[in-house]
Image: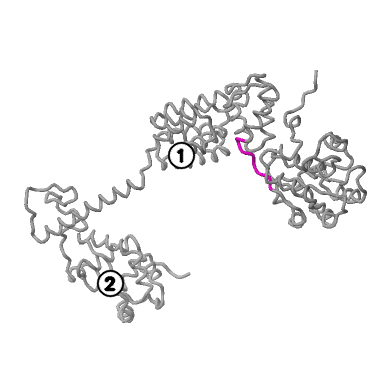
Amino acid sequence: MSEYIATARKWRPMKFEEVVGQGHVTATLRNALATKRLTHAYLFSGPRGVGKTTAARILAKAVNCLHPKDDNPDNECEICREITDGRSFDVLEIDGASNRGVEEIRNLRESVRYPPTVGKYKVYIIDEVHMLTKEAFNALLKTLEEPPSHVLFIFATTELHKVPATIVSRCQRFAFRRISVGEIIDNLRTIAGLEDLKIEDDALLLIAKKGDGSLRDAQSMFDQVVALCGRNITYPQIAEALNIVDEEMYFRLTDLIKANDAKGGLALVEELMNSGHDIREFLAGLLEHLRNIMIAKETGSTDLIEASDLYKKRYAEEAKAFSVADLLRLQRFVGGTEAATRWSAQPRFRLEADIVQMISMASAAEVAELIHRVDELKAKLGEQRRENTNATSGYTPPGPNRANPFRQTATAQEGSPPQLGSAAREVSDAEINARWSEILSEVRKQRISLGSILESTKPLGVQGGVLRLACANEFQASSIRRHKEFLAEIVHKLLSVRVRVEVEIRPDLSAASSSNENPDPPGQSTEGEHPVIKAMRRELGAEPL
C-alpha cells in the first residue's frame, strides 16, 4: 500500500508557470534570472495559501540548478532533488514563529559567512518573518544590508504591516494576490483528472468558494471531500461533509419575504438549528445571496455572480421581485444581525426576531415615487391657498360646488384654531398691549428663562400677521429668535390668531426697562444680574449662598 500524500504536497508546483494566479510575480522572477539581475533579498507578502513559500522554493532551486531550462529548475539534477526533499545544506527554511529570538538570528549571522557546499547560492527562506522580535530584526538588519555575495534571503509574511520599514526597504517586495474562484476550480479539476476522480461542477464551485482565495485551503477541503465521498463526488455529499447551508434555503427565505410569511420564517430557523448549521455562516451566506440578487437587479446581468448556470437563472428571476432600495436595506439589516449575534447570549432568539422583522418590513418607497408624491401635495396646497384667497376677497368660482379636502368649511367647530393660510381675523396693537401681561404669564409657566427675557422687551405692534418685538441687546434678541415658534403658539393659544414673531434691537430700551423693574429686595442689589437669576429670585424666592 502506497503512502498517502496530501493534495497540497503531492501537487505542489515545481516550475514558475505552475504557480496559480501569481503571473505578475513569476514573470518578474524569471526575467531576473534570465538577465542575471538577482537581488540579495526578496519579500513575499500576501494571504495564506497563495504560493509564497512555493515560489520561494522554486526560486531557490532555479538559482542553484545545474541544468536550468527556460529559467526554470529542471527538477532532475541532484541539487533540485535535495531541495525538493528538504535535505539540502544550501537551502535553509526557517520558521519565524518558532525561531523568533535574537539568539537564533545571531546564529544565522554566523552561518552566512560560510559559502554553499554544492550550489552557487546559500538561500535562507524565513517564513512568517513578521513574528521575529524587534531585537531579532535589529540583529538581522546589518547582515541584510551588506550580505555576502553567495547569500540570498527570501522572506514570506501574511502581515506585511508588522515588518519594520527598515527591513522592507532593503528587500525587493512582491505582493501575492488572492486566487480567484475560477482559477481554483481549474486547478481542482486538473487534479481530479490526474487522480481519476469524478466530481460535479457545482461541487467544484462550492469547494472553491469555501477556499476564500486560498488554494491550499481549497485543496485541504478537496481531500476531506474525497475521503468522505470516494471517487464519485456530488454536490449534496459535499454540502453534508462541510456542513454547508443549502442554497435552496436562501431562496426559500426570500420567497417568505415576498409573501410576508413570518410563521414560515420561524419554521425555517427551526429547520436551520435542527440541521446543526452555524448561525453566522448562515447569515454570511444570506448576505451573499442578497448581494447576488442586487447585482442581477442593478446590472441586468449575472456575469458577476459566482454560482452555477442554474442558480444564475434563478437570481435573474428573483431580481424582478425586489427593488434596489429593498435589497440594500435587507443587506444592512443582515449585517447588523451578524454583528449582534457574535455577542448575544441567545443568538437563536436574536435570529428569529430579526427574521420576523425582515419579513414584516414594508417595501421601501423609491425616491422618484416620494418626489412625485411631494409634488402632488404641493399642487394641492397651492390650490387650497388660491381658494382661501378667493374666499377672503368674496370671489366665488363659477360652476357647481367643488369638494376640497384641504379647505376649512363653515361646519368647523366654533372656537377651533384657524388654519395657516385661512381667512383668519387680524389682531390689533391695542389687543396685544392689553393682553401682553397674560402672554408673559403663560410663557413663564412653561419656560421661565424666556419669560424673564420678555419682561424687558416691548411689543411694537402687529402688521400683516407679523408681531414685532423690541429688545435692548443681542443676547435678548437671539434668545427670542430661538423660541419664536413657541411664542407664536402661545399667542395663537390665547388670542386665536396666527402671527410670525420678528425681533428688533433698540438699545434705548435698556434704561427704560431698568427704571420700571421691581425694586430690589431689601439689602440686595440685582443690578447687572442675568434675567434668569432675577426670575429665580422673583418666582422661586432664591437667595445667594
**Mark 2 or mark 1, which has the lower sequence index?**
1
Residue at 76%, 31% in the rendered image? 9
| Residue that lies at the very extreme toward the top in this rendered image | 1
Q: Amino acid at mark 1?
A: Met
* Residue name at image x 84 percent, y 37 percent: 80
Judge left or right: residue 462 versus residue 5.
Answer: left
Q: Which residues fall within the magenta stretch?
A: 175-182
Q: Nearer the viewer, mark 2 or mark 1?
A: 1
Label 2 – label 1 distance at C-alpha: 57 Å
Residues at marks 2 and 1 touching, judged by CB atoms closer than 8 Å: no
Residue 374 image position (x, y, % from top left): 29, 50
Residue 21 in sight here: yes
Task: Give the structural element (helix, strand or loop) at label 1.
Answer: helix
Q: Position of residue 422 (x, y in %)?
A: 17, 57
Q: How many marks?
A: 2
Res 145 quadrant in image: bottom right
> In terms of secondary structure, what is the magenta stretch mainly?
loop
What is the quadrant of the N terminus in the image?
A: top right
Determine the image quadrant of residue 450.
bottom left
| Viewer-nearest residue: 55 or 226 | 55
The percent position of residue 537, horizontal first and vertical second, equals 38, 69
Give the numbered dot on residue 294. 1
Residue occupying the point 60% across, 36% down:
181
Question: Residue pushed farthest left?
Answer: 399
Q: Which residue has dot 2 on it? A: 469
Question: Where 3 sits versus 82, above or below?
Answer: above
Crowd around label 1: few <14 · some 14–19 · many ≥20 (10 Å): many
Badge number at residue 129: none
